[in-house]
Image (cartoon, grey):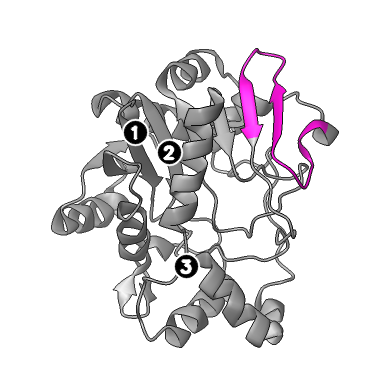
Amino acid sequence: MPRIIAVIQARMGSSRLPGKVLLDLGGQPMLARVVERVRRAHSLNDVLVATTSEAQDDRVAEFCQALGTPVYRGSDHDVLDRFYQAARICEAEAIVRITADCPVIDPVEVDHTVGKFLRSGSDFTTNRLPPPWHRTYPIGLDTEVCTFNALERAWKEADQAFQREHVMPYFYEGIPIQDLNSRKDAKAVSPRGFLVLVLNHDPDYGSLRWTVDTPEDLELMRKVYLHFEGRDDFSWLDVLGFFEQRPDLVNTNSGIQPKTVFDVDHRWK
């Protein structure tokens, strides 16, 4: 078995909801919720938080140290470099990419994605791709897995801002959209020779938004944690059941447009 490390990206400088990773969610900072949920995945050897070297992220580093979670600090906008350096330092052979704005990330889904990655022999396995590709899992369960060798190649070769900021596009960029949009797991070889596996779910729940990028998203996730009385041991299917009981909840953040693979922070230089 390869050494598999989950790297959780976290920073205070969100453009739409500054400081969101340490905002309260049912009595705990959101980052604590993500870290604790990811730690429950059985397929991982360790969990590490990758934040920036900016002064505003001193709080993130201090919080991780208090949690007993390893932390790496690197580039703010060149997230690919930050991600690669974190993986290199912890001697990962395979890396699971998680973002700290996904407070209902499911350890069972992490294990499911890692298992598919290992069995397929792919360079990159994911349960989502950003627009213009279609997704079938709720936004907020996002789990991406790659080999260290593939990540190192992307780190060396990627030269576009969106490739560096979004970390993984170099693997799947150029694959025709129709080759990966499916209700079944889809496999394709990218123009750069990477074997890519995209996991799909039937029925399609891709319209559900369970991430935190705006005040409306935060309001919705606070309702979820209130429903579960501040616990964080619920599954994504439990959340789905809550939404089926309360279909009106979808209206809380349904008008928010997800970022495309080509969108970059205006502060990128």
Q: Is residue 183 above or below residue 237?
A: above
Judging depth in this view, the residue of 13 and 108 nearest the camera is 108
Spatial CA span between label 3 and label 1: 22 Å
Q: Which secondary structure, mark 3? A: loop
In the shown orientation, is residue 43 left or right of residue 115?
Answer: left
Q: Which residues are magenta?
A: 179-197
Q: Residue 203 occupies which quadrant of the picture?
A: bottom right
Quadrant where the N terminus lies? top left
What residue would you read off at disc 1? Answer: 4
Q: Residue 176 occupies which quadrant of the picture?
A: top right
Q: Would you call the spot at circle 3 few (<14 residues within 10 Å), some (14-19), or many (20 or more)?
A: some
Tell me which amino acid carries mark 3.
Ser
Q: Which secondary structure, mark 1? A: strand
Tell me which amino acid carries mark 2.
Val
Asked whether 187 falls inside the magenta stretch, the response is yes
Q: Which comes before the other along the chain, label 3 or label 1?
A: 1
| Residue farthest along the front direction in this orientation | 119
Tell me which amino acid carries mark 1.
Ile
Circles 3 and 2: CB distance less than 8 Å? no
Residue 81 percent location from the top left of the image: 41, 27
Spatial CA span between label 2 and label 1: 7 Å
Tell me if I can see residue 91 in this picture. Answer: yes
Mark carried by residue 96:
2
Residue 197 percent location from the top left of the image: 63, 32
Q: Which comes before the other along the chain, label 3 or label 2?
A: 2
Mark carried by residue 140:
none
Asked whether 59 falls inside the magenta stretch, the response is no
Mark carried by residue 235:
3
Circles 3 and 1: CB distance less than 8 Å? no
